[in-house]
Amino acid sequence: MKTKVTKFNGLYVCLHIPEFWNGKTVLYVHGGPGSHSYDFECGIQSFPQLKNSMFAFITYDQRGSGRSENSSQSLKELSHAINIEDLTYLIKDLPKIFNLDKIDIVFGHSYGARLVYDTLWKHPHINILYLLVGTNIYPNDAFNTSLFLDLQILKNTQPEEYELALKLIVNNNKEPYLLSPKIRKLFNCLSSRQTARQHFYWANPKVQTWWNKINTNSKVHDNDEVYFRIVETFNDEKFNTGNYDPSHLCQFGKYIIGFHDILMNGTTTFPEIKNNIIKCYASSHYPQFEEPEIFINALRSLLHEEQNYTPNYKNVSGNA
């Protein structure tokens, strides 16, 4: 693949064009918050199903994360709302910057899937297909499950801190996940925490080993301060009020859920959109790497089925 790198409004952005390109472009939105797109950039070079898919991919690191601009001053200004604003501009302006006809599909993973969903909910006029991977259809459930995983690790490794965490939750009168930044700081070693959580992230040990290797050798790392900051801002978002309904977006899309993804309740059934959910039974949190052929086929099916899709819902802004 040929890669073009640019900076857009302080964001690190790359266009990856395959040797044989079908003219279709996918924008990847990474998870976290506070993570980066380096692993996916390696994945589209490493996995034949991705490399030979004939899709071009755009990757970017979200504001304050990875290789994008980051400073103590800008950290204070970070929020989920700012990430929505950034993604909106990227979808609109990157075709001009890279001389593309358009971005055909926006693909969000984990937190990135929530970011994509919220962006499209806020902007029903955006004409784009979407693929949400490694996320719960109901995002608040996923954040509470993530907190539960942290509590289990604390219980097994730091019992005193576990008791402190329980007291915080018992005395809390808001959504428990809003305490995640405080509870995360109870860990003596965040890298050990991340290692323990990986047991819940992977179904394929070989792919897990590959992922660990590229991240160990990388100079691009997750930013915990950005994670704390973004999560703290969810309480201020109008999207965090239970208005989620996956059938309510004007845009057409699909969801990929790894059956083994405990974090995102991969075994859960969502009957309201059962025809648009793809279950990956040999995957956990990273189906795009553990079952890349299913991921690529989902992208292709979106393009094929788009012609038969007619939006019939008016979202909260009242626009069809």
Image (cartoon, rainbow, N blue to C red):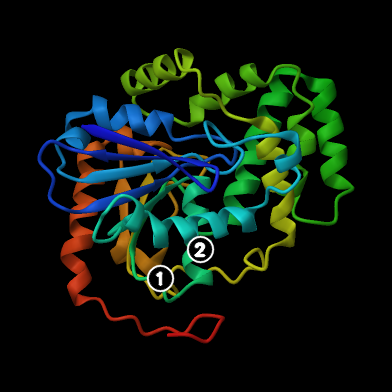
Does 52 appear above or below 25? above
- The residue under label 2 is 119
Residue at (28%, 81%) from the top-left corner? 310
Secondary structure of residue under mark 2: helix
Query: Among all residues in the image, which is located at the extreme left?
Result: 20
x, y percent for residue 197: 56, 27
Write down the residue under mark 1: 126
Comparing 12 with 210, the one in front is 12
Q: Position of residue 138 (x, y in %)?
A: 54, 59
Q: Is residue 218 above or below residue 36?
A: above
Query: 214 or 301: which is nearer to us?
Result: 214
Give the CA distance from mark 1 to mark 2.
9 Å
- Asked if labels 2 and 1 touch by Cβ distance under 8 angstroms, the answer is yes
Type of amino acid at the residue the image marks with label 1: Ile
Name the residue located 51 percent from the left edge and 23 percent from the top edge.
220
Q: Along the horizontal axis of the image, is 97 left or right of 219?
A: left
Residue 255 appears in view: no
Q: Is residue 119 above or below residue 86?
A: below
Q: For mark 1, does the 10 Å Cα neighbourhood hold few (<14), some (14 to 19), or many (20 or more) residues?
A: some
